[in-house]
Amino acid sequence: MNRNRLLAALVALVLFSTTMLMGQMRPRGGMMHYRERSGMMGNLGLTVIDGEAYYLVNLMPEVVFGKLGIGLDINLRFNREGKLRTEDFDETYDYFRILRYVRWGLKHDPVYARFGVLDNSRLGHGFIMYYYRNNASYDGRKLGAELDVDFGNFGFESVYSDVGGAGILGLRGYGRPLRYTELADIPILGGFEVGATYASDLHADANRTWGDPTGAIVAARDGGAMTVVGLDIGFPLLSMSALRSTLYADYANIVDYGNGAAVGIDLDISGGSALDLGMKYERRWLGDQFIPSYFDALYERERFTPLGPARFVSKAEAMKSLTASEGYYGELYARVLGSIHLLGGYYSPVGVRNRGVLHLELDMMEVIPEILLIGGYDKKNVGRVFTLDEHSLLYAQVGYRPYRWLVISTLYEWTFTPEKVDGKTVGYKSQKRVEPRIGFVLTF
């Protein structure tokens, strides 16, 4: 079967499956919620990638049957000669990435499993892995897997970022030891939790250091896995259906580098359909050569920074110059009337300029029926917040809906793309995508 026939068959399968199943709709921005109704979005438009224009055909169904959810993302881009964009389907792996995800349940359910795109992966309280994305680069997106099981007295969380190659393997096991004693029914003590985390980037160059930012050659590590291990404890101060709060402490060590610790508290308030709130506050103490949440939204971009065709500087190398510091992390999540979804988090180091870390997400798709507004923004080394650079990720879609089923919008994305030499990725460069679209939205 040739490429065009295969793509046609996949599109037909999507249209058929969407009519047979019911599901929940979720925007591409990676918001931490699922919609209550199933549906499919489709778009016709124009994509401009680094100044080159392509015609776009896009289908994005998200369906669910019970706890089983399926999401696809088909993007066909044609140049002026009618040929498919080479980078979209130049490897067998690209065809499998049409599958956005298959999942069972949701994160924090007793059993949760996901295969496909990982939007906001985390382990435990997030001191080692937090908001990690394996799809931050469109041309370098991967298929990953998550599996969490909570047996009550003990459980585990797991993640693997790239089933097609050497990726990040993360595993957190935890137990509630006092449930085996007479203290099991005592508030706070009965839910006391102890966890241990192992997370490692298995890529052959994850711990290799070649050169420095000035281009000078320095002694290089032999490479190999980059591993972070940690311990954590948690005390559930409140555990009710509408009000939950946990006091926790974390310790982590980046093997062969430094270590750090954090103490924090989180609070979740459920007000039914009117208002949901989530808050988190964390105090951090970081040693030399240590980065909290080492595996984060920008990790795939920061793993390698190219210095030329023959060498690069890695995140491991950049970390070697870091000295001990302290800082604060705060986060707020709000869902208002089931329509406005807002998430914002910021890490502020004490006495260190231009080293803040920002994470924002916004979805106002259902607030005003005629308006579409979805966005997500990650930025590190914050000095000027709205200056896009190699430490930024941005997704924004703004549009107008003259009818409930018709959307006229523009998508803007600041991401990055792999740089390859002899077929091997040696780093990444920033990439800007702009897509004017005319699309449809169907809900069931």
Image (cartoon, rainbow, N blue to C red):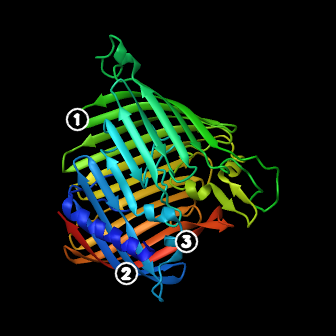
Residue kind at label 3, given as amino acid type: Gln
Residue kind at label 2, given as amino acid type: Gly
Residue kind at label 1, given as amino acid type: Ser
- Mark 3–mark 1 contact, CB under 8 Å? no
Dot in front, 2 or 1: 2
Distance from label 2 to label 1 (Cα)?
45 Å
Circle 3: element type? strand
Q: Quadrant of the C terminus?
A: bottom left
| Residue 140 against residue 184 in the figure, above or below | below
The label on residue 241 is: 1
Question: In the rendered image, which residue does mark 2 sit on?
Answer: 45
The residue under the point 44% across, 74% down is 2
Question: In the rendered image, which residue does mark 3 sit on?
Answer: 431
Dot in front, 3 or 2: 2
Q: On the image, which quarter does residue 431 sit in?
A: bottom right
In the rendering, at what x and y percent does residue 233 appear?
46, 27
Q: In this view, does 431 lie to the left or right of 314?
A: left
The answer to whether residue 74 is visible is yes
Nearest the viewer among 64 and 400 is: 64
Q: Is residue 239 left or right of residue 142?
A: left
Nearest the viewer among 178 and 329 is: 178
* Circle 3 Cα neighbour tier, 10 Å, few/some/many (<14 / 14–19 / ≥20): some
Nearest the viewer among 276 and 219 is: 219
The answer to which of marks 2 and 1 sits earlier in the sequence is 2
